[in-house]
Image (spheres, rainbow, N blue to C red):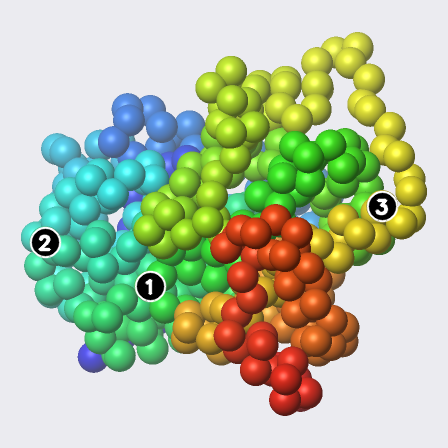
Amino acid sequence: MPMLTSQTRVGVVGAGAMGSGIAQVAAAAGHDVVLSDAMPGAAARAGAAMAGTLAALVAKGKLDEHACAAIVARIVVVDAALGDNVGVLADCGLVIEAIVEDLVAKRALFTRLGGVVAPDAILASNTSSLAIAAIASGCPSPERVIGMHFFNPAPVLPLVEVIPWQGTSAAVREACVRRVAAWGKTVVVCADTPGFIVNRVARPFYGEAIRIAEEGIASYATIDWAMRSIGGFRMGPFELMDFIGNDVNFAVTRSVYDGFFQDPRYRPSLTQQRLVQAGFLGKKTGRGYYDYRAGAAMPEPAKDENVGGAIVDRIRAMLINEAVEALNLGVAGAEDIDVAMVKGVNYPKGLLAWCDELGAASVLATLEWLQAEYGEDRYRASPLLRRTAREGRKFRA
């Protein structure tokens, strides 16, 4: 059985925001860490940026100076670790991949890693939506491959989705759950299905909001206001997409849509595609759904409680239905689904608990009205939601 302890050396491949954040988490938990990147200078820049971030925490009194120095000392940064320096990962008992979200690249990396590390070393992918089974294919001893999806920024957000594929050994799954929990993270275990829990269940938060705006029912600003002020969400869908990056958000939607064989529930939006094609990616480019350039004024919402309430009811019903269908298809248990949405994307409540509060019959009525109005399979209710409403049961009781 693979053993992961605080003495296990951890390798992280990919020194972008996710990779460097994961390296910081592991080092803070006492691990010696190798942070590597194939792009010359990338790992060194990530290490320097991390040291600066930690120093800022010390200055604010949020981190002890000795703890900061210890974290930095535990991380070794290496360029091109899969090239000339491939041997630096050989004694890592756990290697976490956080490279570009491309299946061909990830599969090639895991095939190479499998021939370098020890036979009982665990290989984990931080992919947000790609199939773990596909990544594992071709890797020597694929039973030690697993998904380990952190949320950005990894040192701050508590959730980690652990995703065993059909061939992952029970011992590897248990070792990863225990170790990630020891890092102080909230762990949920989910099936190897497109989007896992969070990126699957959250799709209507974006897609249905865009649809409402496309229909002229409300502006971006009004929808964001409604979801924050009436729905209780920390951010509205359009400001959140601009924060994430429309390119990133659109790519995840495309991945989930394709992964589910073009199920209309996940259909991407032409509106968002055009923004991506125009380079309007959100805050990082200065324009997205909103204009962030100097001198640009942010639009004011129309604060109509009736319109806002209808917006919240529509998007919330779609979100709840997605959570119920994930439960219905065995993606994860009810508690893990609710925990994932609260801890991973800061939803005000777990969606299944929210359904219990509203009543399954009420949520079902909203979906049936939408399907009758639009005549689209996009709004079909989960069979489990129908049964729960008919029997007057609850999901979390």
Q: Amino acid at mark 2?
A: Gly
Element on which disc 1 rests: loop
Alpha carbons under labels 3 and 2: distance apart: 53 Å
Alpha carbons under labels 1 and 2: distance apart: 17 Å
In front: mark 3 or mark 2? 3
Residue under label 1: 192
Q: Amino acid at mark 1?
A: Asp
Whole-percent x, y for residue 328 in the image: 47, 75
Residue under label 2: 138
Q: Residue at x 19, y 57 (%)?
A: 136
Q: Residue at x 36, y 61 (%)?
A: 193
* Front in this rendered view, residue 150 or 39: 150
245, above or below 235, in the image? above
Going by the picture, which residue comes out furthest to the top?
295
Whole-percent x, y for residue 166 in the image: 23, 70
98, above or below 343, in the image? above
In front: mark 1 or mark 2? 1
245, above or below 363, in the image? above
In front: mark 1 or mark 3? 3
Q: Amino acid at mark 3?
A: Val
Residue under label 3: 307
Q: Are marks 1 and 2 in contact (CB under 8 Å)?
A: no
- Label 1 vs 2, first from the N-terminus: 2
Q: Quadrant of residue 59?
A: top right
Left or right of 50: which side holds 232? right
